[in-house]
Image: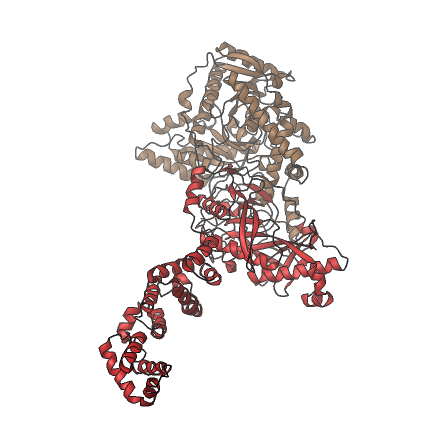
Chain colours: A red, B brown
Amino acid sequence: MAPITRTTQGTAPAGVGALLRFPLNGLNFAINAMVTPVSTATMEESMSSSAAARYEAVIGLEVHAQLATATKIFCGCPTSFGAPPNTNVCPVCLGLPGALPVLNGAAVELALKAGLALHCSIRAQSRFARKNYFYPDLPKGYQISQYDEPLAERGHVDIVVEGQTKRIAVTRVHMEDDAGKSIHDGFKDSDRYSYVDLNRSGTPLIEIVSEPDMRSSGEAYAYLTEVKQVLQFIEASTCDMEKGHLRCDANVSVRLKGAAELGTKAEVKNLNSFRFLKQALDYEIARQVELVESGGKVMQETRLYNPETGETAAMRSKEHAHDYRYFPEPDLAPLRISAAWLEELRASLPELPARKRARFVAEYGLPEYDAEVLTATRAASDYFEAAARASGNAKMVANWVMGDLMGMLKAEGKEIAESPVSAAHLGELVKLISTGELSGKLAKEIFPKMFSKGQAAAEIAESEGLKQISDTGALEKVIEEVIAGNPKQVEQYRGGKTTVMNFLVGQAMKATRGQANVAVVTDLFKQRLG
Amino acid sequence: MDIASLTIDGIRASLLARRYSAMELAAEALRFAEAENPRTNAYLHFSPERAFYAARRVDERLARGEEPGRLAAVPVAVKDVIVTKGVRTTCGSKLLANYIPPYDATAVERLEQAGALLIGKTNCDEFAMGSSNENSAFGPVRNPVALDRVPGGSSGGSAAAVAQGTAVVALGSDTGGSIRQPASFCGVVGVTPTYGRVSRYGLTAFASSLDHIGPLARSVKEAATVLGVIAGRDARDATSAAAPVPDYTAGLDGKVKGLKLGLPREYLKELTSETGELIYAAVDDLKRLGCEVREISLPATDYAIACYYILATAEASSNLARYDGVRYTFRSGQTETLAEMYRNTRGEGFGAECKRRIMLGTYVLSAGYYDAYYLKAQKVRALIARDFADAFQEVDAIVAPVSPYPAFRLGEKMADPLAMYLSDIYTITGDLAGIPCMSVPCGKTASGLPVGMQILTRHFDETTMFRLADAFEAHSRAA
């Protein structure tokens, strides 16, 4: 695309490939300095734990997830991360005069999958709406979102907290386009100006809104975990929080336990990691309880979480008093979803994490914890199942995956999908152990080599001469030597002290550098000394 | 060559007979347009580079013996709300005074593919908001027929250019009558096609659900030819229609005998002026051509103005939000804070009419007012559309006035915006219903001011509209 010519006298030329600059002062998310933050520590001291125990929190989450499409929601620009500023742009996502949105079918498909996976009903006809507000990184002056006719509604997510399963209702799932990014730091004139990068403008998002069904930060944490897992399983989103692919806001209020009415809620923004979510909620709940206990009132306001201090603080009230003036987007026809397409998508959905967990417990006899770890990602569960099938010993595979494999992957910063040990190779290793062809000790020695070389267990055993010795002929000689070299122990065994057998077997293993088949060696000793 | 009386067919014949080349025509057309422009201010800027580039391509095709295109070497003017790659597109606004788009509107692309020469960009009311072309940031356009009068708006520059003869045809845009009313005031043909017939991609949005691109020309046939070139599905406009585009000129067969025409009672009740007399005379002509004329009723008409000025301003308030000083627009120099940048840029940048409509539109969409205004207006819009659908059960076309009066004097109505809004009454209904409609000249007042007759037909039935207009035009030329 040709560079966009700047129109303005006296301002720096800007356009494609350059950052756009605008005055900084008065940004609407500046934190209100008038609000004095209260630290959690102070609150804990000033408030008896019995007071806190009389309250319960009421929490609802709004989760934004970036859909994993190759191109943007209303134009053909790539969604790739990390391109030079203002290069992944075109007239549509720059909001140039005359440009029009055309809906990306792949984004609709992923949003529908998310709606289905969250057990929502999908509207046969949904509609896009304009959400109007001014901000420099919003090039059209409005966001194209969905308002009173969202794509999907009335779903749920089941979470497990302290062994109890709880159902959290999902109000709606709707599609929208993302804004660009404002950059407030790092420039010579950052004290006076901010800059805008519009590469992200037009990236497809879904917003998942829950009912206020959560009662603690732990429940919120579990809910976000579950939503993230579901979206990753169906490959609707990578949910990479560091890249901003998963973002979260929370609506929080407190009330006396047993109260029927809801307290006044505050919206807490900027909860961009699981840790921040928990910290921010704990802080906010404590703040509200203390406020109410001391006779104060919770204000309906938007509060921003500050990860540096672990506190939330109110945004300037006049600037978040938005009236978005929603109205139906006239540039896009209503979105109609055929029953046939929906059925096709429903059929294409993979097994979802909750069901997979239950199945792993039932089918493989895994403990709950193991099932949870192994279904954390689709890649992990796929890997586990493939290895389990190849080995015939799922429990042992689970231990290997959760132990040695994940440990080594973590040490090298690798994902399980990139594991140098294939699922088939791990399955084979476990099979060799189960059938007694390889001792557990040998396997532990072989596995790191499989990891570094990417070879099968048998190959490594072969090349390193580490094959288990089960040949009685070869072992008899060793047994004779052990018996000859340890007359005292032999005597004790013969005298009825059978526990000495362990010592004798150990000696034989030592002599064979661990390659002897323990069962065969034991049998041979018994025969020889019996 | 006589630039002012060129026709599409005449140019084609001359090119094929090698009487002149496309390059020679481009040079002459540009010279003529630039020389004539000070009289009317119809053009905001000219585009010689593009015109010569297109002309060279036409000459090359001719030299190779290839088909030079349906609009070969036809000088066209394009309203300055339609974007043109590399050619300044101001929308008649100070905010975009120096804006050069990086891409072409689909309609412009299609014109050039057919061999047309883009001569220049025409003046208009700021962001197409107005009925007199007096809301341009770059001065009003004068009506070439009577220089002390307005050319109509908002496509005043396009109508004036065609009437003046500096362009053979022009593109305008119509949201509430902005093609038909200036066509009527300047005595040319102006066409608002079915909503979705012509891609809006590259048309700077005023009110997206009402915006149309359409042609202005000196004859029905030429308007039909241009529409045939620019019409048809465009993947870049999700509201553009997939309906096949018929050969409009092939339908100009004069066969209008027995055509059932409706005369809406509500459009004529207050029409007692000279305009009314000319419309009635035209209806008599149509009867003489064998059409059956009957009175029909469009009962929701009374609510049309209110409905239109709610919906159009609501959409406008959103569509104009992007002119904020951040990127390609004018930015006020007096800004220390973000809020100031917005306020000062938009305060200094927009003219009074745009501000008025942004405020109206913002108001009707505000929390607590949405249901009473926007939602109710949507319901009225549906009623207006139903009125037309009902009428078309009985008749094949509707004939009506375009404007209650002919071109008025510059400055005459600027002090009374409401009176200006009310003058749109006959044209906004067609836009609200999304049906094709056009203005065809039907005579002049005693003082020589042109008056247009409006013809409206069913969705996607431009063919009947053109056939009737063409037969009427032939009849009135013969008379």
Quick check: B116 above or below A262? above
Which quarter of the picture shows residue A471? bottom left
Considering depth in this image, is B217 or B180 the residue closer to the camera?
B180
Which quarter of the picture shows residue A527? bottom left
Identity of the residue drawn at 48% across and 18% down: B468
Considering depth in this image, is A364 or A320 the residue closer to the camera?
A364
Considering depth in this image, is A66 or B159 the residue closer to the camera?
A66
The x, y position of residue A343, in whole percent, is 43, 41
Q: How many labels does the image show?
A: 0
Residue at the farthest front position: A495
Tell whether A428 sits left or right of B412: left
The x, y position of residue A258, in whole percent, is 69, 53
The x, y position of residue B139, in whole percent, is 61, 36
Identity of the residue drawn at 42% across and 63% down: A415
Quick check: B191 above or below A480? above
Considering depth in this image, is A191 or B32 the residue closer to the camera?
A191
Tell whether B87 sits left or right of A54: left
The answer, for residue B256, to whether it is visible in the render is yes
Quick check: A243 above or below A122? below
The answer, for residue B427, to whether it is visible in the render is no
Tell whether B353 sits left or right of B237: right
The quarter of the rendered structure image containing the C terminus of chain A is bottom left
